[in-house]
Image (cartoon, rainbow, N blue to C red):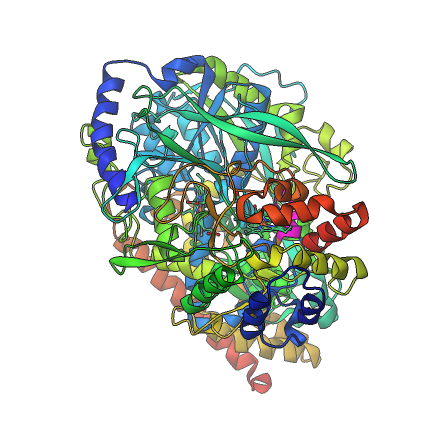
Amino acid sequence: MMHLERKNGGWLPAALVLLASLAWGPAGAGEAAAGGRFTTRDQGRDAYQQILWDLVPAAERERVLAGRGLVRQTWVISPSLEPRIAGLGPTYNRPACISCHPRNGRGAAPDDQARPMHSMLVRLSIPGRDAHGGPLPEPVYGDQLNEFGIPGVPGEGEAYLVWESREEQLADGTRVELRAPRVAFRGLIQGPMHPELMTSVRVAPPIFGLGLLEAVPEADILALARAQKKAGQGVAGQPNRVWDAARQRQALGRFGLKANQPTVRQQIAGALAGDMGITSVLFPEPNCPPAQQACAAQSDQHPELVPGALEEMTLYHYLLAVPAPRNQGGPQVRRGRRLFAEAGCASCHQPRLRTGPFPGFPALGGQRIQPYTDLLLHDMGPELADGRPDYQASGSQWRTPPLWGLGLLPTVNGHGTLLHDGRARNVLEAILWHGGEASRSREAVRRLPAAEREALLAFLASL
Amino acid sequence: MGQQMNIKRRRATGLLLAGAAAAGLGGWRGALGAGERVVVLTSYPEELVGRFQLAYEARHPGRRVEILWRQSADALAYLRRGGQQEVDVYWTPAPRNFALLKAEGRLAPLLLDTAALPSRVAGYPISDPDGQFAAFELAGYGIAYNRTALGRLGLTPPRDWRDLADPRYRGQVELPIPGRVGFAPVLIEAVLQGYGWDEGWAVLAAIAANAEFGSGDSNPGTDDLVSGRRAARLTIDFFAAAARSSGASVSFIYPPRTAYNPAQVAILAGAPHPAAARDFVEFLLSAEGQELLLHPDVHRLPVRKALYEAHPELSAQPFAPGNLAYSDVLTRSRQGLVAALFEQALVQPHGRALPLWQALHRAEAAGADPAVTAEARALLSACPVPDAQQADGELRRLFDFPDRVPGQPEPPPAPARLAREAEWRNRVEAAQARAGKLLQAWRS
């Protein structure tokens, strides 16, 4: 793999290859093990839900299972006979993690404006920053529109998408229709939003392999940013710095579509609070309107999440294995891999990283992984921009999403829609939306003859 | 940091929201119109609920299905607390709740066209004869097994519960505990009602001799079965079907006399959106709705007979002649008793029972005196409460599960109950001691 990239480096900057050789180490037996030891051969509908039980110490088994149960659980309104799963609302988006992350996979955008969002959300803010440098919430609706309320509490309103289409032409004459959404609201309970409202429409991404990404040393990520800058080829990733609520300090952002969360644990606590209205040790502030007597009288126990539950859910996330790539020896896939490097995709979608020591689950340390991300923010141009800054991320920057497991998305979730707002209906559309720092890559793909394009797509489908 | 600020702010918002709602200022719900919403209370998993929600909303642009999720005991308590004024449709696998809600006058007539919807399985009603609740789907009980693991053990696929008593299954079967695992009471009753009380217990005891007990609904059993670490598992069809659809080498069989337990749907008497409620229920029972049950993420058995002809790949035949007339009323009437017996007769003494069963298997294989082995087997298989006694209403009531109240601890067990359990334990120990003597020569 490495030699291919060296030999056919194209415009791939030397500094990147150099860095790559430092970080990747020798290719070898582990070639097809995208997640190091945490790689599953499952290629079916459960491919994103695999726990490799042999890697789980017997003493941790029950906790992993409990975490899985909570991630699959539909949460209930307090009071309940099941305090472990109670605390939903008073306002929320969906009652279960897997409503938005079905089969631990990806959500999708509604295809027409009559339909509500079922597996995505809209972040809200106005210009300015909060005390920790994060987005300043919309003054009335907060930083996320919660569409549902428990009985007696109205939902805040409904967001929907209006699609606009245009056509792109590839160099060989192939036409591709691209669609982009505009977000709009109806039934807003408190009337129109702030005049300077900024929105960010985000589809839920897959949630496997995240323990490995958390275990990538910060220094390696920062070194990638430096190397990209030094290469001077227009790709210049930037780390996000976000608020770490557990450590009470700024930290490198890794998770969320703008790398707006520092850890899996905080990401989960944020989802519980923001998407489901469930308080936890990290976000203990009750979400219960005091004037709602019924609600205030009912959910008086905060945090609502019972001790240990957040850790169990985090542990489950840590252990979710990465699907092994398939057909890696096939000539078309090999050609596609070369084209992926030649088109400069690999400078952001880093094929190889390694994990450092990881006390949270030591077995995750010391793994060579192939996530196809640099965990950095990139300016993706005006068309993908949401115009809503998120900590250090600008309105046009997004975190490079991992591409591991990409080819199994249709199998797992029955669709192939991609990008932060679900606009791309397949991989080719996703590539054609790349702008900004990735314009050059997009143009390289646009120029490819059909057979080469197919090879690139075959490679991506093999991941 | 965004989240926390957001929540603080929301407190203020909440005040306004509450005010707006109280003043009837309308808002998003008002904007859509009351008829455009249907509020559904369910305990179905998200995979099933989400699919029906999407399909229904796609058919009725603008209409919204709002889901309230509660487990059965919680749902009943909630509906009794006044939730019946907030909910349109109750949709869940909990026959007891439907029977109680009907008896308490909390349900409205469904007024369904039931021509294509059978109301009985093997003569036993699955829908309310008075039309206040109707069966929506059936859960079938049986044996899931791993084909590779069976091959390794040199076993052919099981056909009936009793096949799992074969000594070659030693340590390879997972048996759920009825007092601890949600689906287990019906499963254990499928065996007890299928064979009759005494023989049913004997079969359970013999299976337990090969089994590990599965605990908890979070259900590691499926993982163990998929990986082949266990060969067989007594379970509900849809657990196994999910594993099967994901490509694992798992199969499932329905024993000849097994339970098909209905899940039902009803409209609440105080439904705020009765017209939408009726429409939603009709959708659930329509050919289109019933077909959704066959989706690999859902895997439930439809109640529309026609679907069984249209899908010959369905191995379940709940409406075929000769099935067990499984009674959920009987199950409920002795659920606490069966759970307590299972715990005292099979779970607690498990460690001491295993070597005795191994000795028995050795003795039988070695062709020991059949009178001796038969007596030892009878001792190890006997239920401490024989058939004649289990029917005693007073005994059953002693073990009834108390209705729980949120936030309140369960009441301690009655002394009479503890005394009974002690009595059973003594009986089991005495039987084990006698069997141990009979099998002395074969014990290792």
Q: Position of residue B336 (x, y in %)?
A: 41, 49
Is residue A128 shown above or below A104?
Answer: above
- Where does the magenta region start and end? A406-414
Q: Is residue A319 above or below residue A28?
A: above
Which residue ends up furthest to the front in the rendered image? A232
Q: Is residue B45 visible in this depiction of the protein?
A: no
Viewer-proximal residue among A336 and B326: A336
- Give coordinates of residue B311: x percent, y percent: 76, 36
Q: Residue at x 48, y 13 (%)?
A: B275
Q: Please say whether residue A386 is visible from this viewpoint.
A: yes
Whether the magenta-drawn stretch holds residue A410 is answered as yes
The residue lying at 44 percent from left, 49 percent from top is A256
Out of B239 and A51, give the one closest to the viewer.
A51
Q: Position of residue B154 (x, y in %)?
A: 75, 71
Q: Quadrant of the N terminus of chain A?
A: bottom right
* Residue at image point 23% right, 17% down: B22
x and y percent of residue A393 in the render? 40, 47
